[in-house]
Amino acid sequence: MDNNNLRYDLKIIASWIEPGSRILGLGCGEGELLYYLKKEKNVTERGIEIKESKVAACIEKGLSVLQGDINEEVEDYPDDAFDYAICSQTLQQVYEPSRLIQSMMRVAKKGVVSFPNFGHYKVRLQLLLKGRAPVTKELPYEWYNTPNIRVLSFNDFGNFANSMGFKILKKAAINTKNNNQDGNMVNYLPNLFATYGMVLLGKEQI
Amino acid sequence: MSEYIDHDPSGATVGIIEKQYFTFAQPPDLLPLESGSSIGPVTVCYETCGTLNQDKSNVILVLHALSGDAHVAGYYHAQDPKPGWWDIMVGPGKAMDTDRYYIICSNILGSCMGSTGPSSVDPDTDKAFATDFPMITIGDMVQCQKALMDHLGIEKILCAIGGSVGGMQVLEWCVRYPEMIASAIPIATTTRHSALAIAFNEVARQAIMADPNWNQGHYYGKEKPDMGLAIARMIGHITYLSDEAMRLKFGRKLQNRSALSFEFGAEFQVESYLQYQGNKFIERFDANSFLYITKAADYFDLARDYGKGSLVKAFTKANTKFLVVSFTSDWLYPTYQSKEMVKAMKKNDLDVSFCEIDAQWGHDAFLLPNPRFSSLVKGFLKGACHGQ
């Protein structure tokens, strides 16, 4: 897999990772990002994924991934065992996001979190004009079957990180297209125009 | 375990394989055992498949389960009706690809399939050891395998792999000789038996010892305790399957009849199956070996032996890349036991992958064809090679 096949949001995350680091991927799916980082940036990877078929796909790629619930499995690692803990497109599905972020920042020096931006104007308009729970390309589920139980916007996460005492070292708001393969940075009113947000967290208090 | 052996439908095979023997611990240099006694000379029966590369870096050590043997793959001769017990996994292009790896499998100490065990002749008396054979442990079996590696000049094992009691040996290797093991795949196994597992083993042992032919173990050259051993095997087979597996395989179906006959014959298919397995087992296995090996499995306790009761501490000795595999329907060594070892490995910052494979065939799932399991092992081995 070369850089061109990597999903656009994962490309941005990959660009934030120092070569040779130790990485923990929480909810790592089929390991696209971990595999890319291992090949291109020579990282030491660990992943946690709950779905058997996805875990198997990771192990078949030669990645070190274990099957389990991220909230439980993250607890077993020693403090600062990793340089980065990455939670990509999963936080919005977690029951206790603050506990998970605390655990991430305990086991790793830095955290990377990415999430769909529920502040996007299309989401807002659907609720405003149709009076219906929003369904978009990025958030394709109905209210009754969505795994996305935490509804947050780009700005929300910033406030949340601040309130937890973590420093935002980097952030990016992006707009994706072509099935998330391509995209662009959103600098103007990101909370309104970005489909996804991503943040690099550090431990120092602001 | 041989009841599953079948030809690989792919037709790929390692071909004709020869049994080999290695004898060591010649008196007075006996092999010291964990129980405090010692034994010698000790013979280890082993087989190899594939080709050892120049720097001896492509060795996979396969460790067999309770009733297995060194015959992991291939055939003994052209008319041999059955291949080795893991032929579906070992061969050209298979998960353990003999075009790339050199596979070694040896029969465990205490067994009856070529290595020294209670049915072997005691050089002091010229009679079978029987129950004068010393008690053995999983650690003692691993010591014998280490002696074989020394004999073959192998200093580094690319991967140690085994299921069930074979998985215990894998774990023992990783803490006893950590510098030798680059990667390890313990499958459907545990770091110590649960009370449930010990209970089943004890009932099986009692069945053998209650057989009048057992005669305190001294039955060689006379009538053997066949009934006891057959019942022991039947108990084993109940634990190797699962509620789901039995429901799918047998349900309440009747054997060769359309209605109940109200008699004590094997009316239900499940009864007939267990009797068949029991009767097949007595043809190839020694009752005393069964007693000794099940006892060794019951004694196995990685936390006690290497961590003063702490599994986390026990794994501080390991320095191995792990792939732990469990099966959803395994109720002999359920997934929670695999998760315990994974947890202890993680706390030691060990490189561990873990997958609970969705399989309905119970504990024995690792012996059955399973594309997911095969591709996991194949991918992990490839990764382990690159990591060297």
Image: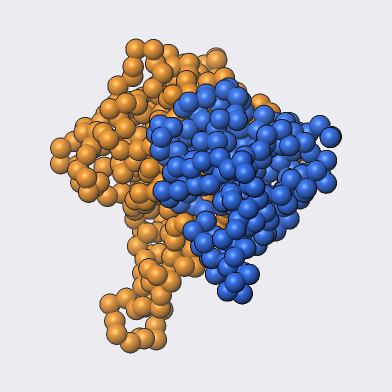
The x, y position of residue A55, in whole percent, is 50, 46
- The blue-coloured chain is labelled A
From the top left corner, tell me how far across and down residue A183 is, in percent: 48, 42
Can see residue B67? no
Q: Is residue A47 above or below residue B155?
A: below
Q: Nearer the viewer, residue B362 or B339?
A: B339
The hue used for chain B is: orange
- Residue A83 visible within the image: yes
What residue is at 48 percent from the left and 16 percent from the top?
B155
In the image: residue B371, left or right of residue B66: left
Horizontal side of A105 relative to B75 (left or right) equals right
Please tell me which residue lies in front, A15 or B138. Answer: A15
A206 to the left or right of A37: right
Please tell me whether residue A199 is drawn above or below residue A150 in the rendered image: above
Q: Which residue corresponds to the image point at 71% horizontal and 33% vertical from the top-left?
A: A169
Q: How many marks?
A: 0
Measuring 67% from the left and 29% from the top, which residue is drawn there?
A83
Residue A166: percent from the left, percent from the top? Answer: 79, 39
Give the color scheme: rainbow, by chain, secondary structure or one colour: by chain
